[in-house]
Image: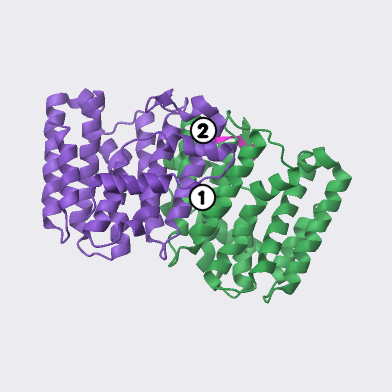
Chain colours: A purple, B green
Amino acid sequence: MRTPDELRELVEVDLSRPEHWQKDGLGEAVRYPVDGGGKRLRPVLCLAVAEAVGLDAERLLAAATALELIHTFSLVHDDLPALDDDDERRGRPSAHVRYGEAVAILAGDALLTKAFALAASYDRPGPAAVLADATLAMIEGQYLDITGADVEVLELHRLKTAQLFSAAVRLPLALADRDDAADWLTFGEAFGRLFQLVDDLSDGDGAVERYGALRTRELASDQAALARGALGRVDADTGVLALLLDELAAQAE
Amino acid sequence: MRTPDELRELVEVDLSRPEHWQKDGLGEAVRYPVDGGGKRLRPVLCLAVAEAVGLDAERLLAAATALELIHTFSLVHDDLPALDDDDERRGRPSAHVRYGEAVAILAGDALLTKAFALAASYDRPGPAAVLADATLAMIEGQYLDITGADVEVLELHRLKTAQLFSAAVRLPLALADRDDAADWLTFGEAFGRLFQLVDDLSDGDGAVERYGALRTRELASDQAALARGALGRVDADTGVLALLLDELAAQAE
């Protein structure tokens, strides 16, 4: 079993493989937001689940990279002036500030499409199907968010964040033909909800605006407990996953 | 063998199936540009190739619908103010005029993702891989076009248009395990180039601006001859495909 840092390094190496990127202006604009860093938590989770169920992490690398590209696509489009209008992302100019709106729109489109090219490189359609499901939910969540629809903040969390974390868990399962999927899905969704609650606590928005910091910490603690319980029931070597969960949960305390 | 009109009707019925569309505001914005009509030439070509190689057109319907959704995604994003800034599409307000820029961006993203969900509904990853390849080429073409890169207009045609027509041919081949692929690919690309030349003749732009109408007609005639030659060499029942080709070629005369 590799540590989270070792798995993260695998992801970074794969993300920087030159064959992923066109060597031209669009390729540069596509790569720019991917190079912006971030914790790579979705792909690391994906690889950790793979190892937990006895698959080679390397076998999941294309799917894990696809996950990160879809996450990055969502950041690039969400930052656009017509949507959240964010000029900065991870301490650098956001893609539309750096390359202009038109190229940022196309770069987001290319990131999303490249993710499906990677997902379709497996011997079965399952990975692409899992990613498409999760991405449709994510887009729906962003739609509800920006149109100010009357939707509970925790339902927005489920759509905008938790579905892609669930996909991180479902991708290795799709390649391992596992039958204890219910607990795995509970774990993935709870992990994703916990991640978003931690993010809201850090930024002081979302659930914190709606419920206050104290209640948000309680909600995070509930999701951590839910994820731990589900992880305890799956038939797998869950040490690294428990570590990832504990690290995340500690940030909500 | 069904006629082009019968195949088109199959496509229209499938595109209007309510289970494709979320019943909410985003679902409405996603469906709006699809309902705007158009000749559905890409999906009709896909179904006609399916029948020519002995597959049920119905088996290709999900892939054909995916093709049309990808084409529609490209129209919605290309019409945006930051790109081509077109307020009208097929005689109606374009998506961003009707629903606002933010929702139009998300609707385009959802169309693209839904296409991959459909492509991943097959028992193999081939259809999703074919669509991802073609879509990446299309986005690259749009990038070169809007950034005014020094690229020959016929190379833009290949990227922006012909790759998706090639995909219309490759999708049934991916499900039929055919080995005469080279002639099929020549046919698909020549058909797509012919389509774009006809479009330029109709709009007076693109190749017509670059070469004049007379030379553009000659180029179209060359592509029609290339497509006819390739079609003559494939081992298939090509009557309906020849009809589609003749109808298209007649528009360039």
Which class describes the residues within 10 Å of circle 2: few (<14), some (14-19), or many (20+)? many
Residue shown at 34% from the left, 38% from the top: A141
Q: Which mark is residue A19?
A: 1
- Taking the image as shown, residue A215 lies to the left or right of residue B217, namely left
SS of the residue under disc 1: helix
Residue shown at 36% from the left, 50% from the top: A64
How far from the left and from the top, in percent, is residue A252?
16, 32
Closer to us: B2 or A164: A164
> Is residue B253 among what the camera can see?
no
Residue stretch in magenta:
B90-99
- Taking the image as shown, residue B245 lies to the left or right of residue A143, namely right
Amino acid on which the number 1 mark rests in the picture: Glu
Amino acid on which the number 2 mark rests in the picture: Ala
How far from the left and from the top, in percent, is residue B140?
60, 43
Protein chain holding label 2: A
How far from the left and from the top, in percent, is residue A172?
30, 58
Mark 2 vs mark 1: in front: 1
Q: Earlier in the sequence, mark 2 or mark 1?
A: 1
Protein chain holding label 1: A
Which class describes the residues within 10 Å of circle 1: few (<14), some (14-19), or many (20+)? few
Closer to us: B42 or B139: B139
Q: Quadrant of the image for the N terminus of chain B?
A: bottom right
Closer to us: B146 or B103: B146
Residue B96 belongs to magenta span: yes
Based on the displayed image, in which of its 4 quarters is residue A57 positioned? bottom left
Residues marked 2 and 1, same chain: yes
Q: Is residue B24 above or below residue B251?
A: above
Q: Which mark is residue A104?
A: 2
Residue B135 belongs to magenta span: no
